[in-house]
Amino acid sequence: MKRESFDTLQQEVDFLPLNGTDHIEFYVGNAKQSAYYYQAAWGYELIAYAGPETGVRDRASYVLKQGKVTLILTTAMDPDSEISNHVRTHGDGVKFLSLWVDDATHSYNEAVKRGARPFMEPTRMEDENGHVIISAIHTYGETIHKFVERSNYNGPFLPGFEKPSHKIESVPVGLKHVDHCVGNVELGKMNDWVKFYEDVLGFKLLLTFDDEDISTEYSALMSKVVSNGNGYVKFPINEPADGKKKSQIEEYIEFYKGAGVQHIAVATDDIIHTVGELRRRGIEFLYVPDNYYEDLIDRVGAIEEDVEELKKLNILVDRDDEGYLLQIFTKPVEDRPTLFYEIIQRCGAQSFGKGNFKALFESIEREQARRGNL
């Protein structure tokens, strides 16, 4: 099938078109302090707030933005609320992966018709700045996909949110947009959730990695990547594989108490600047030994960046048929060894760094061993 006809077919069968990631909402133990961390260390700008001062009695939410990346940090006022229970069980973690759509009612109806479990029926919210329509469905673990329709709204974020009365001066580090979000699921559940995204949301299987691709002497995992029709939303799904010792996926599920979002990959156009600035502000990254760089050019071919600079910052490089990419992974950003971030710069490459898997997972295992969890 020629590419043109494939693209046309994709448009014809894409019953749930997505414009991208609208926002990612975390449930956290202390949203005010978490918001300070993301402003001071990551350079996000505080753009909106909802809480008792704005008439919201049960929670406080801080909305942070950099480039097209929008995060919400939400904490509960009631120790027995659903938010508090989520934090008690999982620690700080992602609750909502929210998708930007043109029609939240259509998106909800199509998903539910195909087997999605409803979380919130299409709901209209409005204030003096216009209205939005939001609906939502369940996905793996306690993670929820919201469908957000906001074409008729021009407020700071959503109805119920106001511009903050006070915020610190933050300096962005060059984060542009969400590249992909990775979910960890229980043993034997990866294919079930891949089928969910294919059947319910119309995603396509993009890539498959088995335990030969992602393994070390001690542990292994399997992963499949699904993408929506236009490629704006990509979700790799991981599950454990048999190994001599506990894999990083098993460690995550043990401490998160179930399936959930493992890491968020955020794109940058200048990874050397972004990572250099994040390191200066105290963000910790996984360590890869210097010998990784000894034959780097032989492995990946010519690149524009200075290898010594990449080595100093511990940035990884990989190449596919479309070009190359640069990537690096933080250590967990919560006290539990759960959520972390990937910083990625794509120089043509559309893959996920398969050539770096061994070095990356050996680095993760070193951290697991330090925690006594390998």
Image: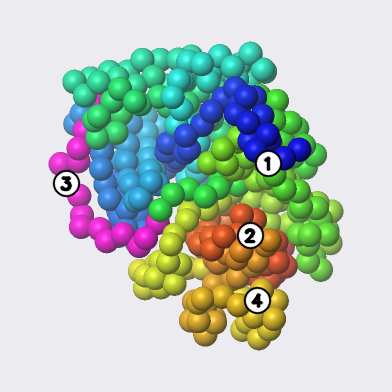
Measured in 3D between alpha carbons, the distance from the residue under mark 4 to the one under mark 1, in whole angstroms, is 28 Å
Residue 3's disc number: 1
Q: What residue type is labelled 3?
A: His
Q: Which amino acid does label 1 sit on?
A: Arg
Residue bearing mark 3: 166
Residue 33 place in picture, x, y as percent: 32, 50
Q: Does the magenta stretch include residue 173?
A: yes
Q: Which amino acid does label 2 sit on?
A: Glu
Labels 3 & 2 near each other (Cβ < 8 A)? no
Measured in 3D between alpha carbons, the distance from the residue under mark 2 to the one under mark 1, in whole angstroms, is 16 Å
Residue bearing mark 4: 301
**SS assignment for the magenta stretch, majority:** loop
Residue drawn at x 57%, y 60% is 348
Residue bearing mark 2: 322
Residue drawn at x 53%, y 60% is 346
Residue 338 place in picture, x, y as percent: 57, 52
Q: Is residue 225 magenta?
A: no
Range shown magenta: 159-175
Task: Answer with left or right where residue 197 lies relative to residue 334.
Answer: right
Q: Which of 200 and 204 is in front in this view?
A: 204
